[in-house]
Amino acid sequence: DSGVTQTPKHLITATGQRVTLRCSPRSGDLSVYWYQQSLDQGLQFLIQYYNGEERAKGNILERFSAQQFPDLHSELNLSSLELGDSALYFCASSVTSGSHTGELFFGEGSRLTVL
Amino acid sequence: DQQVKQNSPSLSVQEGRISILNCDYTNSMFDYFLWYKKYPAEGPTFLISISSIKDKNEDGRFTVFLNKSAKHLSLHIVPSQPGDSAVYFCAAIGTGYSTLTFGKGTMLLVSP
């Protein structure tokens, strides 16, 4: 158990809809990262928050947005969903704003299926 | 543009033998490299890392080798065990970066 909690574990929805994925980081971790894993793709970095502020942005679509709340949990909002958005979405956390200490702690992921 | 490449999608090895997983990178700013292991229905977990000032780091059955001039690293598992069967992700980060760049992963199957 990494200590990172993601909900929901599975989500099935239709094209055009909007969903929200939630992540609670490990106790004490200030950074939250969102990654997307599509079929045949590695872990694609989407966005990072550190202590409530956006710290880095990756290949995140404009239809997607995220935020980190004062209690440090984070939400990833996906809107106007397309079939290609079907993927595993991972949240990870770390103590610092960077990863040079070595480790990100990943949740079990939220599997999104868009029909 | 894949900055971290794992060119072998899968690898099959017999129990007790050595598993060698390879990773290449293109960004010369990367100076810290990590391997993560992922079991089905679980998130990736950190396995081992290496700084660019070293060429080898060992942790039990796992050893990571780094060849900076070739921009290549490899993960050796000796001896391989069936419980090592998982997807292995190579990741890299550099000074000024705050996030890891991952490869696509290599699925290792260790058969008894």
Image (tube, coloured by chain):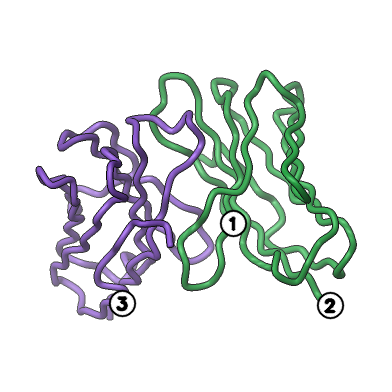
Chain colours: A purple, B green
Please state if B11 lies on the left or on the right of B14 as rendered. left
Tell me whether circle 1 and circle 3 mark residues in contact (CB < 8 Å): no
Tell me whether circle 1 and circle 2 mark residues in contact (CB < 8 Å): no
> How far apart are the alpha carbons under marks 1 and 3?
22 Å
Q: Name the residue under label 1.
A: B37
Give residue A7's position: percent from left, percent from top: 25, 68
Chain bearing mark 1? B
Please state if A91 lies on the left or on the right of B80 as rendered. left
Identify which residue, A106 or B95, lies in the foreground: A106
Identify which residue, A24 or A85, lies in the foreground: A24
Q: Which of marks 1 and 3 is in front?
A: 1
Q: In which quarter of the image is residue A52?
A: top left
Extreme residue in the right direction: B17
Chain bearing mark 2? B
Tag of residue A76: none
Give residue B6's position: percent from left, percent from top: 66, 49
Task: Tell me if residue B12 comes above or below residue A90 in the rendering.
Answer: below
Q: In which quarter of the image is residue B97?
A: top left
Identified by mark 1, the residue type is Lys
Q: How crowded is mark 2: few (under 14 residues within 10 Å), some or many (20 or more)?
A: few
Extreme residue in the left direction: A70
Residue drawn at point x = 65 percent, y = 32 percent: B50
Return the disc, 1 or 2, that comes first in the chain's sequence: 1
Q: Mark 3 points at which residue?
A: A10
Q: Judging from the image, what secondary structure is the residue with disc 1 in? A: strand
Identify which residue, A42 or A105, lies in the foreground: A105
Quadrant of the drawing holding the N terminus of chain A: bottom left
Q: Quadrant of residue A51?
A: top left
Please state if A89 lies on the left or on the right of B29 as rendered. left
Residue drawn at point x = 56 percent, y = 25 percent: B30
